[in-house]
Structure formats: C-alpha cells, structure tokens
Amino acid sequence: MRYDVAVIGGGPGGYVAAIRAAQLGGTVLLVEKDKLGGVCLNRGCIPTKTLLKSAEKWEGLKHLTEFGLKADDISFDFSAVMARKSNVVAQLRGGIEQLVKSNGIEAVYGSAKLTGPSSIVVKKQDGQELCFTANKIIIASGSAPASIPIPGIDLPAVITSDDMLELSEVPESLVVIGAGAVGIEFAAIMNAFGSQVTVVEMFPTILPSVDLDIVKRMGLVLRKSGIKTIAGAKVTAIEDTGDNALVKIDTGKGLQELTAEKVLVAAGRRPASEGLGLEVAGVNYDRSGIAVNDKMETNVKGIYAIGDVTGRSMLAHAASAAGMVAAENAMGRSSNMDYGVIPSCIFTTPEIAMVGLTEQVAKAERREVKLSRFNFAANGKAVAMGETDGLVKIVADAVTGKVLGMHIMGPHASDLIMEGTLAIRKGLTAQDIAHTIHPHPSLSETVMESAHGIDGPIVHQAVIKGRR
C-alpha cells in the first residue's frame, strides 16, 4: 500500500501532523520508535509540570498558617509523587493513542530510515524490517539532550533530565549544569522536596534568553527559596569522591569545588537527525538541523521536516503548529509557518512567560521603545492568592505604540502571555489592551495596568520621584 503521507516521529509535531493529514482525507502512516507523545509527553513538558505541581502543593502546605489554616504532621511520599507523574503521562498517552486510532492512522513502532524521496524502511524492536512508500514524508524525529565535553561527564552520579524523572528518592544535594528552563525547573522541584541545590550557568546570567528585569526578580526568588546560583562559570571537570561527585568550576575569578550526590546536565538539546537516511534521500541538513522553508519543505520535493529536528524553535507548541502547516501542504493546501510570534514559558513558582522582543534585543536593534512595568504585589487577586512575586513588563514601539514584547513573571504567567501573543500577532497597540475592560478581581488586570503605563499613568501604582 502506498500512503498519502508518512510521518516519522510521534511527538507533539508528528502526531498532530498525522491527525491533520488524516482529517484532510489522507491515508497516513505514523512511525514512532518509542512511545507516542515524544519527549514532551513522556520525558519533558508533562512529567516535569506534574512534578512541579506536587512541589507547589507541598510548598503551599508549609505555608498554611498564612491563610489561617493549621495542619500537623505533614509529610510527602516521593514514590507516590513519582507514581502520579507516571499515571498522568500514561493517561495522556492513552488519549493520543485513541486519537490516532480514531482517525484511521496506521501506527507502526520502530526506527525509520529514508531509503529514497518517497520510501522508508522501519526496523522493529524484534529486528523485523518493513518497507513503506508514501507520496509525502514528514520528518518529526525531535531532539536529544546535548552532550558537553567535560571530563567525568559519564560518571554514575551524572544524570540527564530523563534520569531525573526516574529517581526513586530525592537526592540530598544536587548540582545543576545549565540555568535554562530545564535546569531551573528541576532545581525548583528538587529544592521544594528538600534537596540542597546549586545551579551553574556558563553565561553571565541565569535564564540567558529572558528579559533582564525578569532575570533579576527570579534570581531573588531562587535565593530566597534556598537555591544557590553561580553564573558566568564553566564546569571544568567532575570527579567521583566515593560518596558524592566533586564538580570543579572556573568562575573567571578563581576555581571552586562543589560536592553533590547527583549532577544534572541540563545544557540544552540538539536535533535528532542521525540515522534517518537523510543523505540517501538527498535532504540538506547540518548540526543545527534540517533546512526547511516556511512551508516546512526540505530541498527534496515531497519531504517535509518539523519541530526540534529543524532547529528552528525547540518548543512543543511550535512543533505542533509546524505539523499542521506541513500536513496541510502535503495534502495540497497552502500554509505557511510564522516563527515570528511564539510564546515560551518556564514553569517555576512563580511562572515566567515571554513573547516578542526583550528590552535588551529591542535596544540592540536600535529601536525606539517605551517600557512599562506593573507589579503583581499591587493586584488584588494576587494578594488574595498570596502570590505577589513578579511583574508584567511591556515593550512597545515609541511611535506607534504597538506591542513588541511582553514578559511576565507571576502566577499563571503561561496563561496570561496569550494576551501579548495575540497583540503582537495582530499588530495591536498597548492602548488596545489598556482600553479593553478586564474582569475584576483577576490576574489579567496586571496586563491591562502595564499597558496603561505605556502612554500614561497607572492607576494602581504609586508615582515615585516623578516616575510612573
């Protein structure tokens, strides 16, 4: 049988592409080497957010007296926490499996390799090889943890994010190499459950891609919670001391040594393009990923690539959007991927979310901008919730007032950021947001108040020394 579309990879890009192609009337083959849902569902987004919720609830229990509540002999069962994580993942994976089945998609489990521009071979776990042909092929093979050349990186105490999700107990101490989203999220989880955590980052600040106002606020929150951060430092070696790992770092001002039970390497991810037979099919790629245009087409007619393997935006929601685009084009429609407006989130407590330009990037591009900030501490709903850390910052064009960037640190930031995402995509001004009536009491009022500050005074923010 010749399929209309064959999809390699069943992650958030691949399974969405397969479903969309099937919705458009195509016969679809979906090949997955492990489990449907990919890294995001099985070893990334969903399990970490599930653990973060348990950590958040545990922290809430420890502060019950602030809400006039009392509870004695509170404790946590880490094995039960991990079991819930696994149950959530299994439930969602089962949902995806049902979606694939209900859409008439044939799912085959094994490692796929291109044997030509319209053919693939799938090697199953039992060694059996199956050959398939398709009019169009969509590559959605995802990414893998990036390795870093550090002596001692292969020691038993050194683990990846995948290993973290399978721990049977909380390590007494943890050194995290890398202060991006993955590193900071795991640091927050383990710290909440009692681990002594130190985060080491090579760049001058933690969360290198985040607006500096947010970075400064989050740095204070992390220190207040007991997490130690060391930025501008390079790990030079890891040694086994018998009971622990010894992490040697160079801060640029001198050498330091850190001791920990576990060392988490959270140094980013790289496109998983090896072993796909790209050379055989003539697909252009390099270390940064498979080259595609905005229709998600590779240089080979009929072959598309989406998600992490392209290196364009390593976010699950970007992969899903690209999957929709690729599927529609594969089925004869005309769609384009817009990488210009993609929100990103970091699920710490409080959350961080951002979209568009940071103040630093805008100024580096020599744009004339106006800035406005509004603190959650002045928001009634946040005060009632007892979650007042954070702010909403808006970056707007100084002439037109159009929103260029929105950066949020605070409760439910991942939900609030959509107001900024829509504003940037539709070319709305800060005044469009400010003059839209927001419900009270709600966290969304923080966005409205910050928007007011672009062209005028903010009602619920005191004027200090002539500043709005």
Image (cartoon, rainbow, N blue to C red):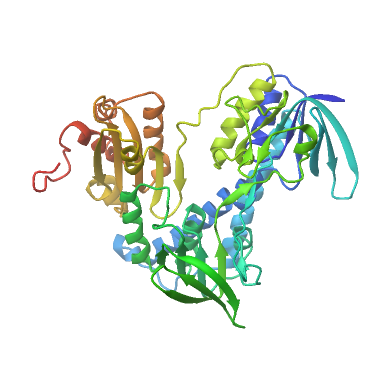
Q: Residue at x 84, y 24 (%)?
A: 2
Residue 351 spot, x, y in % from top left: 40, 50
Please tell me which residue lies in front, 363 or 212: 363
Residue 16 as seen in the image, left or right of residue 386:
right
Q: Nearer the viewer, residue 192 or 334?
A: 334
Residue 303 x %, y %? 72, 28
Q: Which residue is most to the left?
A: 465
**Splitting the image into 4 quarters, where does residue 110 fall?**
top right
Residue 295: image location, x then y, percent: 60, 24
Nearest to the observer: residue 102 or residue 311? 311
Quadrant for the N terminus, please. Answer: top right
Q: Horizontal and vertical percent for residue 269? A: 59, 50
Q: Nearer the viewer, residue 140 or 439?
A: 140
In this rendering, position of residue 257 left or right of residue 99 = left
From what the image shows, is residue 33 above or below residue 101? Answer: below
The quarter of the rendered structure image containing the C terminus is top left
* Residue 318 located left or right of residue 122: left
Occupied quadrant, residue 381: top left
Residue plotted at (48% across, 62% down): 187
Q: Residue at x 60, y 25 (%)?
A: 325
On the rendered structure, is 204 left or right of 305? left
Disc tally is 0
